[in-house]
Amino acid sequence: MGGLDERLANYLTRHMGRPVRVDSLDRIPVGASRETYRFVMRTVGETGPTSRRMILRLDPPASLIETDRRTEYAAIRAFHGSDVPVPELLMVEENPDALGASFIVMQEIEGGEAAPYKLMEPPYEANLAATGRRKWSILGSIAKTDPAACGLDRILPPVAADDCWREELQRWETVLDADELEPQPIQRAAIRWMKRNPPPPAQRISVVHGDYRTGNLLVNDRGAIIGVLDWEMAHLGDPLEDLAWSINRVWCFRKDERRGGMLPKDEAIAIWEEASGLTVDADALRWWELLACLKGQAIWISATKEYQTGATRDPLMALTGWMQVNSQDRATLELMGHLSHGVSK
Amino acid sequence: MKPDVSVYFGELVRSLREDLAPKLPTAFEQGAALRLAMLSQAASEEFDRAAARRFEENEAMRRLFESASSFVKSPDLLIRLQNVGSVREESIHVSELERVNQMMRVLLIELHAHVELLVGDDARDLEREIWSELSASTERRAVSIGRF
């Protein structure tokens, strides 16, 4: 068995029916749920030799979240050609025989940066407010998209407007139950509160990206968002879920009030309202923000467990346990009105 | 033990950031080195306070369990509050403090849920005290690498 580049080339050759060479295969530090590689695909087409920069997204042995590559493939395909920028897909392969795991191959969107710590620095820093306005405008567009019109209603499981909250709460509480390595009194209190104070039914059943945050956006050096990535958690649900996740405190990369490191919360919400055509109910959004805290904590403690048990030794997984778990509890306390600001870190 | 552990960690963090990461050939490897530096920074902070924060937290929970004993309605919960509240650590090793801490935090969750359903000023006062301790415990566990 050869290296990953050789096995990928063999697979692509079989799949495309002509010789393919894979050059410059290089793992890149994006995405927490998949191993992501950049490579150059060289082949000979009808018009002669071709060379394309591509991305391989390979399921890892352990990840932050259990995801479905077919969901990601369908969601990206559904939004291709819309005002939501997504990469062009080449293939999805669910059989692990070729590369040892399921994978997706897609076009690389060149000239973009996704690492949040880089986006907070020059040359991106000067355009962060404009990038932020576009960020929440795109999210509003996703919320406005009719799942039936883009075909995702036939692929993603249906959900009733008054069941969205219940399904998500149950989903993430189940993860917490299964993966917590230590008691979580703050999250348990939040869960009890959420069950006693459910939000109103969703105003609209939308496509929910599921992980819409700064680190899943490709931004060019002029501040334009040229790609929305990581659709593997996409589902149908209440669009407030995505909005709440996008403004989660743990994405305050500049350690100030700017959500996603880009815009104040109120401004982000106003832009989203305009783009989505929806009006945000403050109490409902607060509920979904608490759900975002639970969802985040469930993801972080799952990653912690993967590291603790030796399923992975990726330092990112350990980092989530030491950094994100505490920040997520602080965010939960803030939303519930119990955060003490008297102690500085 | 000299040099101080904090001095060693400080040099490790600097070395990972300034010496090792820039020399690694790929962005992925550089990112991993920087993450190891962040983890080392957090480990340094935790090393100094590991026993202290657990000790403080365990004492705070014992006080909460004692306060609750006068008005908790469930006999079973009352007995467990008394039993767990009287457990003393057999040493001040972090692992022992942690063992008792986890046992007490499981019971704290149960007490919190119970108190939420009780009426009366005593219950509300204890609920506020529980939240205050949960907030304080979160601050004790905070690391400088956190974003919030």
Image: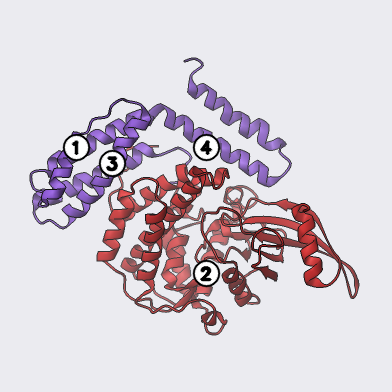
Quadrant containing the C terminus of chain A in the rendered view = top left
The CA span between labels 4 and 3 is: 27 Å
The CA span between labels 2 and 1 is: 46 Å
Say which residue label 2 marks: A234
Residue located 57% across and 35% down the image? B37
Q: Earlier in the sequence, mark 4 or mark 3?
A: 4
Chain under callout 2: A
Q: Is residue A131 visible?
A: yes
Residue located 52% across and 54% down the image? A64
Looking at the rendered structure, the secondary structure element under dot 1 is helix
Q: State the image coordinates of residue A80 (x, y, percent, origin top left).
A: 64, 75
> Around disc 2, counting alpha carbons within 10 Å, would you say few (fewer than 14), some (14 to 19), or many (20 or more)?
many
Which amino acid is tagged 1?
Gly
Q: State the image coordinates of residue A174 (x, y, percent, origin top left).
A: 38, 60
Q: Quadrant of residue A286?
A: bottom left
The chain drawn in purple is B
Say which residue label 1 marks: B85
Residue B13, placed above or below residue A73: above
Residue A342, placed above or below residue A236: above
Same subunit under labels 1 and 4? yes
The chain drawn in red is A
Q: Which mark is residue B103?
A: 3
The CA span between labels 3 and 1 is: 10 Å
Q: Quadrant of residue A168?
A: bottom left
> Around disc 4, counting alpha carbons within 10 Å, would you say few (fewer than 14), some (14 to 19), or many (20 or more)?
many
Same subunit under labels 3 and 1? yes
Same subunit under labels 2 and 1? no
Say which residue label 4 marks: B39
